[in-house]
Amino acid sequence: MNHDSYDNAYIGGILNSVKTIAMVGASANDVRPSYFVLKYLLAKGFSVFPVNPGQAGKEILGRMTYARLADIPEPIDMVDVFRAATAVPGVVEEVLRLDPLPKVIWMQLGVRHDEAAARAEAAGIKVVMNRCPKIEYGKLSGEIGWTGVNSGVLSSKKPLMRQGFQSFGVRQK
């Protein structure tokens, strides 16, 4: 797959199909980007499990934090990676040991590792690199347009109301 650009349908399909997300590298520091993304995804109705060995056993935004992906007590649909690109191969190895396998590995803005992505895709896992689910959700749901930002997505359709604070959901094409 070409990871230089993604079709809106590919990203939208992922965001509409996942319900549980493990956030590797989640931070309890309320000024860190992972904290904002965790808060946003929780508000949109996703079940998010923070993964951070330094915070294991503590809560971040009311959610128990785990040391490893294998410690999470339920199956995960997506692993969101908030770690440096050099840590991605280790995260992918940990993901490949899970049963069942997650549907998606999502690497945050600035994080790309093509070899690790190829290993995940060979196992049937979808991969997104160098993107933020918060930004993509906002773009595809029309929320970014509220602030005057051109999201590149234009629709005259009435927003679909979903659960969560100001949650419109991602549009299906």
Image (tube, grey):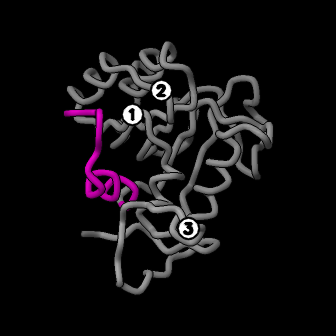
At horizontal 24% and vertical 30% (from top left) the residue drawn is 121
Q: Relative to 49, is 169 above or below? A: below
Name which residue type carries label 1: Met
Task: Give the mark nearer the N terminus: 3 vs 2.
Answer: 2
Q: Answer yes or no: do the residues labelled 1 and 2 have beta carbons within 8 Å? A: yes
Which residue is tagged 2?
111
Res. 46 image quadrant: bottom right
Q: Residues within 10 Å of mark 2 (few under 14, many from 20)?
A: some
Name which residue type carries label 2: Val
Task: Give the mark nearer the N terminus: 1 vs 2.
Answer: 2
Q: Which mark is residue 148?
A: 3
Magenta residue span? 1-16
Residue 155: x percent and y percent? 35, 77
- The secondary element bearing badge 1 is classed as loop
Task: Give the mark nearer the N terminus: 1 vs 3.
Answer: 1
At horizontal 68% and vertical 53% (from top left) the residue drawn is 39
Q: Residue 65 vs residue 28: left or right?
A: left
